[in-house]
Amino acid sequence: MRDDPSETIRSLTEQTDEVSKIVVAVGSKALHEKLAAKKLEHAKCFYVRPDFSKPLGERVATAINKALAEEKLAEYDYVLKVDADVILPPDFIEKNLANLPDFIGSGGSAMLFKTSAFLKAFKGKYPEVFADDTYVASKFLYKGYNVKRWRRQPQFRKRETQHHSYRHELQRGIEWYKLGYEPLHVLDYPREFIYDQCERKPFIDRIFPVLGYFLAILRRMTRYEFAPWIFHMQVRRLLYGKQFEY
């Protein structure tokens, strides 16, 4: 919401499958004024004041919902959610819609929903949760929709390495519990710390999510409706290997 989306917008206008409308939610007044001055022909931009008391995922979801509220979703076949640091190859939409998926994505930087499926599964409202991308994919899978990974991958501008606060990492672990992750997957997470030393990532990135997960268990926090299904599928994966493509 705070990165300049000009290159992203350009990549959308150059798609071989025409994009009907581009709506841009901006979390910076200065950037909003900059974009307004450009008088972008193909994009509608508006400012969304970010609530920094909320995690990033929730702030982004709030902005998405404000963008969705501006449109009559039933008039569109698909909705593409894309971050401002993403550049799409010209045939990105064409290739990924070849099999007419209900949802396609891998990570939250770019996700494509079939509008009819989104309206039915989510009532047209994007979930305002910590791990919004995982939540969306998990719910579509749980509901039995056609969920795929990208056939044509998005490209990313170079990102700076970011380290989150311990509160953020604790919340990540709590979200794992709410999503239905089983303990062995969570306990295996710190094992990767030894490999992270090459990238000099702090240990906090590995240990606090685990603490958050078990804290959520102790507090018996409410889990999402699909959590038992996710738990079951992860156990099956441990026993029998990967069960589905996504």
Image: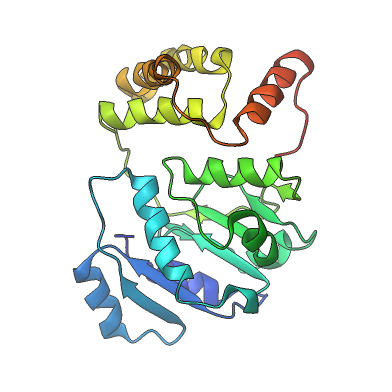
Q: Residue furthest left?
A: 30
Residue 74: give x, y in percent of width and height: 64, 75
Give me the residue at 42% from left, 17% from top: 210
Q: Where is 88 relative to 214, above or below?
A: below
Examine the rendered structure and indicate whether residue 222 appears above or below residue 54. above
Q: Is residue 168 above or below residue 183?
A: below
Query: What scheme was used to colour the molecule?
Result: rainbow
Residue 130 image position (x, y, % from top left): 41, 41
Quarter of the image where one finds residue 31? bottom left
Please state which of residues 144 and 219 is positioned toward the viewer in this rendering.
Answer: 219
Q: Position of residue 80 (x, y in %)?
A: 57, 64
**61 and 21: which one is in front?**
61
Question: Is residue 110 visible in the rendered structure shown here?
Answer: yes
Judge left or right: residue 151 versus residue 69: right
Return the x and y of residue 206 as percentages of the image width and height.
Answer: 39, 19
Q: Nearer the viewer, residue 86 or 145?
A: 145
Query: Looking at the image, is 128 positioned above or below residue 184?
Result: below
Quadrant of the rendered image containing residue 101: bottom right
Identify the image quadrant of the C terminus: top right
| Residue displayed at 42% across by 25% down | 173
Q: Residue at x 42, y 54 (%)?
A: 61
